[in-house]
Image (spheres, rainbow, N blue to C red):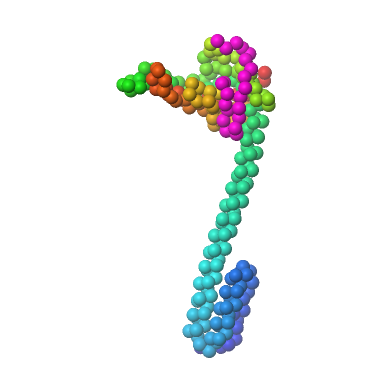
Amino acid sequence: MPGRSHIRTAVRTYAEVACGLPIGIGILFHVSCLVTQNALGNRKAVYKAMKKFYFLITQSLRKSVTCAAIAALMCNVSLASCEKEKDAQTVYDMLQGTWVTTHAKGHDYLIDATTGVYKWKDDFDENINDITSEKWMKFTLDRNNKVTILELGDPEDLVLPAVLNYSFNGKQLGGMVFSGDFTTYMTIIDISDTELVLELDDKGTDEDGINDFYAIYTFKKVDE
């Protein structure tokens, strides 16, 4: 059987550990110490008391770790929210200026709604160098949420330059310029000080059939 000095040493060691633990754990330790002191003459009782104390400490630590993890998660969510707002402003700032199309990749399908047969099927993946391409577009965005179309490869009936409105919600550009036949926006896939990548996913059904248009457009920023 160990002497009283050994048990006192063990108790002091546990006390030093408990000093750095939450108050609740300290109270649990105090209770365990009382049990230990009453059991100085009984080795088994001391062992059981220490074992119980260790179990209570472990449980409390797990709860503390869980609470800390939840607190850290909440902080991360809060920071992410702030970062999202900052990113939206940064993207908006980067959008300002004049852009020209440099690449287009996607498909343009028209499917018979009854038979499922393709009436039209066009897959494209092309570099766009100038106005000779029907996918060419040169436009300017400003802080008044105005987009000025300067050049179009296929202007149809639009008189250029044309000034129209656009909207921005942090990740999408809306307005007539950034719309399809069924979709009212284009998604910003990527943006930098010199490059902009937009996605148009335009699907719907009309009297002609099932329309399936999808494109990724790449633009570069240029001097006016």
Check the image and report above or below for 123 versus 22. above
Q: Residue at x 59, y 71 (%)?
A: 25
Residue 122 seen from this side: yes
Magenta segment includes 165: yes
Q: Quadrant of the C terminus?
A: top right
**Residue 93: quarter of image:** top right
Q: x, y percentage for residue 12?
A: 62, 79
Q: Residue at x 57, y 63 (%)?
A: 64
Q: Residue at x 52, y 28 (%)?
A: 199
Check the image and report above or below for 53 versus 177. below
Q: x, y percentage for residue 61?
A: 55, 66
Provide the residue span drawn in magenta: 157-177
Q: Residue at x 55, y 82 (%)?
A: 35
Q: x, y percentage for residue 55?
A: 51, 72
Name the foreground residue: 166 vs 17: 166
Magenta segment includes 188: no
Q: x, y percentage for residue 3?
A: 56, 88
Residue 105 seen from this side: no
Q: How many marks?
A: 0
Residue farthest toward the front in the current orientation of the protein: 207
